[in-house]
Image (cartoon, rainbow, N blue to C red):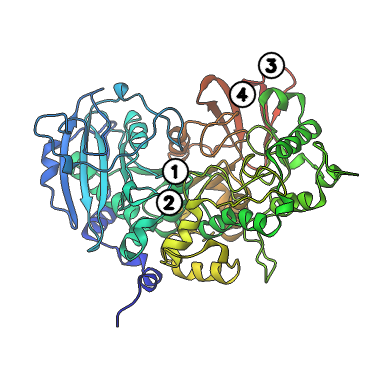
Amino acid sequence: MKITATEKIARSSFGRVVTAVSLALIFTAPTFSQKEAPVVSCESLAKLDLPEVKITMAQPVAAGQFKEPSSDGPGGPGGPSAAGGSPAAGPRMGGASGGMTGPFPDADKSSLPAFCRVVATLKPSGDSNIQLELWLPLTNWNGKFMGSGNWGWAGSVRYDGLSLGIKNGYAVESNDTGHTNADGQNGDFAIGHPDKVIDYGWRANHVSTLISKAIAKAYYGTGPKHSYWLGCSLGGQQGMTEIQRFPQDYDGAVIGQPAWPIINLNAAQIWPTLLHRQNPAGVMSAAKSTMVQEVIKKQCATPVDLELGYLEDPPSCKFDPQTLLCKDADAPDCLSQPQIDMLVTQHNGLKNPRTGQPITYPTDGWGGGSGFTTAAASSGPAAGGAGPGGPGSGAGGPGGAASGSAPREEQPMGVATGLFKNLVFQDPNWDWKTLDMDKDLAFAEKVLATVNTANNPNLKPFFDHGGKLILYEIGPDTLNYYKQVLKTVGPAANNSIRAFYMQGMAHCGGGVGCDTFDKLGVIDQWVEGGPAPDRITAVKSSDAKVTHPICAYPMIAKYKGTGDVKSAESFVCAER
């Protein structure tokens, strides 16, 4: 009997991928010297015979000589500009440029050390076409492996993630999850291609991890001692999927603002536009959004907050929107009752209309966004959006509708509608205005349960083999998950998980606050037996002189009373 694409997606099982590669890694314990050197040539890796894998390139790259690929070919040595280069040999273009985009800094390629560059195509199914890059240090490998999370709807290799890993001595992998950016950034690749959906959801990262470790073992004569996952937004959701479904793949994960729970989050990114259609009188202008933020700033910001440019402790801000009710006619410094109702509704999070249970959790306090913003103080559809995760589960920042009553045809985030249109319903004509927050979300859970939902709080299998998890830039849903992990696993979980707010940080990078820290250094020290990180020094990527502590929940950074507020040394981590 022929089944539909949706049925095949729903029936997929992540338990079936056990290959000779995974068995070899599981049953062969690695041994290590201080620094591992290759035991074979880089070029010889092209001859490796691995199941469902075709290695299309294995070439050494001299220090400082890597050139990021164009969309037409692999670039670098052997790329389109080099003699004998074959455009067909390289993976799809990806990576960040021009500063922080996601969890990885834009590395100076001229400072990269020498490495062995391996490019491969993985075909775990008849419709799979996963493009993988693995970079292996030519010298001074630290004996460890890093997996790089994607961004948006994926569709490209992350060269910024590869650069971060190789600069720190890691064997490092990135893959495109089995589709190209040319296929669209709203999941357009999915319709009629259930195996590509499965690759995108979990299989590409899991299989790429196994294959990469096998190639590393062939190159160095031993597999990695420890493996770490780094990702934010979609990459964070991918990391959650890995440690929940394949707890042996990684020994540590550093996960930022995950696109999670993926179905609830995308529904919540459509929700503001539905609210605006239902009650246009409740939509605020950009000027009124700014006014609300200024009121929050005046009421809740301390002198130190004003210097920092954001609230250090949003939960302590007890702003009451009702105080802004216009007493007579509408005015620039007040809100109508419909606007107040809209503001409060969005602030309290999306709820199931039948049961009243939360779909997304309410924000604790006000003004927690970068620069005293609050997600609920929106004047239009959800802003920004680095893929299915986007920058939050609410309506985003100022901008959008021109006025509260003027008619305007709003459209929700395409990345959010794409999940339902292309992955869930497999219908290019699906209308987002018909989204039922009860029935449709329940159906989506059934379809994607084995694909890319990662809601299981039982991390005991991950923790039991020494796995450590750092959650950063946490929002209300991630904080709730953290609490559920502690409740499910019990007191022992305190030895294996930490959660950190990063106030003033925009989605995964940028913003007015400090937006990055030594993720690999922190997780490696913890996994190697060091103390759990209760205080981490974060840095502002655009100005390395600015530092600030991020403190393990429930602690917050408190100013000592003296010293430069732009220096982490002027703060302590303490209970609220």
What is the distance, in whole Å, between disc 2 and disc 3 at their CAs? 40 Å
Between 440 and 533, the residue placed more toward the observer is 440
User: In this image, 76 relative to 314: left or right?
Assistant: left
Residue that sits furthest to the bottom in the current view: 1
Marks 1 and 2, the one that precedes in the sequence: 1
What is the distance, in whole Å, between disc 2 and disc 4 at their CAs? 31 Å
**Residue 462, position as x, y percentages in the image:** 45, 54
Q: Indicate the amino acid at tag 3.
A: Gly
Residue bearing mark 2: 238
Residue located 51% across and 71% down the image: 443
Residue located 85% across and 45% down the image: 325
Residue located 18% across and 57% down the image: 51
Say which of marks 1 and 3 sits in front: 1
Q: Secondary structure at mark 2?
A: helix
Residue 458 visible in rendering: no
Marks 3 and 4, the one that precedes in the sequence: 3
| Callout 2–callout 3 Cβ contact below 8 Å | no
Residue bearing mark 4: 568
**Residue 201, position as x, y percentages in the image:** 39, 58
Q: Residues within 10 Å of mark 2 (few under 14, many from 20)?
A: many
The disc placed on residue 563 is 3
Say which of marks 4 and 1 sits in front: 1
What is the distance, in whole Å, between disc 1 and disc 2 at their CAs? 7 Å
The disc placed on residue 231 is 1
Q: Indicate the amino acid at tag 1.
A: Gly
User: In this image, 118 relative to 495: left or right?
Assistant: left
| Callout 1–callout 3 Cβ contact below 8 Å | no
